[in-house]
Amino acid sequence: MAEMHNNGILLESGTNEIEIMEFTIDDNLYGINVAKVREIIMSAPVKPMPHAHPAVEGIFKPRDIVITVVDLPRYLGVEKEKTTKDLFIVTNFNKMYIAFRVHTVVGISRISWTDIQKPDKTVSGGSEGVATGIAQCGEDLVTILDFERIVAEIAPETTIQVDEIEAMGPRSRSDEPIWIAEDSILLSKMIEDCLHKAGYINLKMFPNGRELWEALNALPQHGSLQKQVALVITDIEMPQMDGHRLTKLIKSSPRFQPIPLIIFSSLISEEMRIKGRQLGADEQMSKPEIGHLVDVMDHLLAAQNEK
């Protein structure tokens, strides 16, 4: 068993670096952000669950917690017999523990987000693709999988729910400009749809932090900044520039520092909260909590308008 110790993972914040755990499925290299990984264990017997998604093997209980096991090779369309040499990568994101079956674990590479390119649609499988990035790790090209999208497909009830917005009842419309950095095409669409339903109709979506930061710097110097960008929402994991680096740049800029900034990510943990706070984020929350996000947006924009 190899346990991941959080206190050894990228202690410095806002460096625009990521640690990628490389693993193989049928000799193909894939990657996952180390921040999502809790431990690696040998595969174990799994109790099947009736009516589950075809890629869900079932559940097992390694210690004091029941964990769902996803057969990642099967999800990716690889038909290969399970063996006792397979490994489980136990992850924790979106406040859930999930184990993913893989064939081998190769190691960990620390790289810059600028070394991760967004795959084109022929590689990612189109707008619903499961590849969120292609990383250059040494001499190897590693496909970074969109684990949030995988879980959203397997268990839709665990991801962003429009019901949370509908439960708020009638809301007034707001045309205040909201800028959002989110690389997952699926989640970006979910967030956009939910915020529109919540009355926020003036949204500008960016696929990564770098493009949002460049757009900020391209704004004209004259006029009210608040009328151009009233609030920024950012994911953490994104190619080219991650959300922590974006937060650091915005909050260390005299011009942009007053813009309220929310980190909205599946990686929110106590350690990540400390990092975000150090970088100047106004609020941080876990990605499924779309209703909470809207409440916080309401509060931050009302406070900004009172100044």
Image: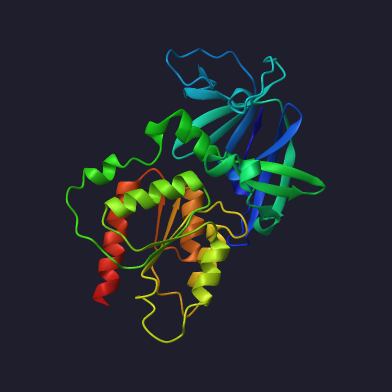
Q: Nearer the viewer, residue 119 or 35?
A: 119
Count of numbered labels shown in the rendering: 0
Q: Nearer the viewer, residue 4 or 21?
A: 21
User: Residue 252: where, in percent of width, then height?
Assistant: 52, 74
Q: Residue 74's image quarter?
A: top right
Q: Residue 155's image quarter?
A: top left
In the visual, does 306 lie left or right of 274?
left
Is residue 33 visible to us here?
no
Write the residue at 73% across / 26% down: 26
Q: Quadrant of the N terminus?
A: top right
Does 27 sit above or below residue 264?
above
Write the residue at 51% across / 12% down: 47
Q: Which residue is at the far right?
A: 139
User: Residue 113: where, in percent of width, then height?
Assistant: 65, 56
Rendered image coloring scheme: rainbow
Does 28 sit above or below residue 121?
above
Q: Which residue is at the far left?
A: 170
Write the residue at 52% across / 30% down: 98
Is residue 162 visible to us here?
yes
User: Residue 144: where, in percent of width, then height?
Assistant: 64, 42
Does 254 sit above or below residue 190?
below
In the visual, does 265 lie left or right of 102?
left
Q: Nearer the viewer, residue 209 or 87?
A: 209
Write the residue at 58% across / 36% down: 38
Q: Nearer the viewer, residue 8 or 222?
A: 222
Q: Quadrant of the C terminus?
A: bottom left
User: Residue 89: where, in percent of width, then height?
Assistant: 62, 30
